[in-house]
Image (tube, coloured by chain):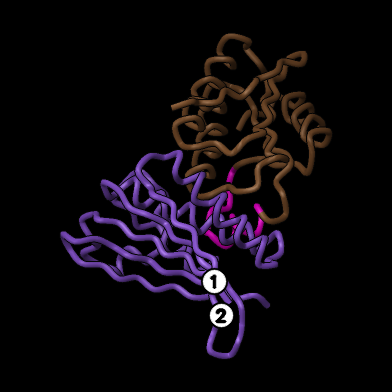
Amino acid sequence: MEVPRIPILQIEDYLVASIQTALHDTAATRFRDDLLERIYETKARGLILDLTAVDVVDSFLARLTGDIAAMAGLMGTTVVITGLQPEVAVTLVELGVELKGVTTALNLEKGIAALRRMVGEGKHP
Amino acid sequence: MTLEERCIPVKVDLDIVLARVEGRNLAKELGFGTIDQARIATAISELARNVILYAPEGKVTVRAIVSDHGRRGIEVVCEDNGPGIADVELVMQNGYSTSSGLGMGLPGTKRLMDEFELETELGVGTKVTVRKWLK
């Protein structure tokens, strides 16, 4: 089975990854592992996970997103999720999966600002 | 009027994505707005994942429907030949799961859709039918 890889970009001390395609579970799980490896390699202080192009976040992807934030946090890297679409926000709340404990921002720009603020203050989740 | 129907076999995790894309496309064609499209796609994703998690295989059928009162809508039927559900009341509780999931699949799906029916028989399989009506 073809497993698409999601590019992970580095900007200064931060990593940015934007999910652009519908991920099946195997690809999503590998993406999580790729992200954690890149965090370790680059010693990134922060990670932006951009979901602007994601039109469905089911309970599996929601849990994976929460896991990424928790795991990166354990490694000392702050995570901000950006670009949740209105319909994704609605379905997450109705599903009963509210990404508690995960920092979110409206878009990439606000996400970077939030990350700078959090990292600058030396706070790690 | 011929009602459209599409059937997607569910065997591997990629099929979850295919099923929800078919569901979303049909919902869009029927005139559902983006939030309802997302509700329907998410519900299909949850139901199809249960097949992958608990049953060897199954299928998702999405079809256009019309109510007795002439209301149009979409029906999603997810059937599997899995072990069946021993305690239906328990699986409808938030947070109950026998896998590594969140336990939000079935109760969450019920909240996303207008109608929800679950038929299950131990050792035979499970069939979940959900519907969403156009407002």
Residue sticking out furthest to the front: B1
Whether the magenta-drawn stretch holds residue B101 is answered as no
Q: Looking at numbered disc 1 in the image, what kind of residue is underneath it? A: Leu
- For image coordinates 42% across by 64% down, the residue present is B77
Question: In which quadrant will I find the N terminus of chain A?
Answer: top left
Q: Looking at numbered disc 2 in the image, what kind of residue is underneath it? A: Val
**On the rendered structure, is B116 left or right of B135?**
left
Q: Do the dots labelled 1 and 2 sit on one chain? A: yes
- Chain A: its colour in the image is brown
Mark 1 crowdedness (10 Å alpha carbons): few <14, some 14-19, many ≥20:
few
Residue at the spot of label 1: B3
Q: Which mark is residue B125?
A: none
Of all chains in the rendering, the one displayed in purple is B
- For image coordinates 68% across by 39% down, the residue present is A51
Whether the magenta-drawn stretch holds residue A90 is answered as yes
Q: Chain of mark 1?
A: B
Question: In which quadrant will I find the C terminus of chain A?
Answer: top right
- The location of residue B31, given as percent across then percent down, is 70, 67
Q: Specify the segment rendered in magenta.
A: A88-101
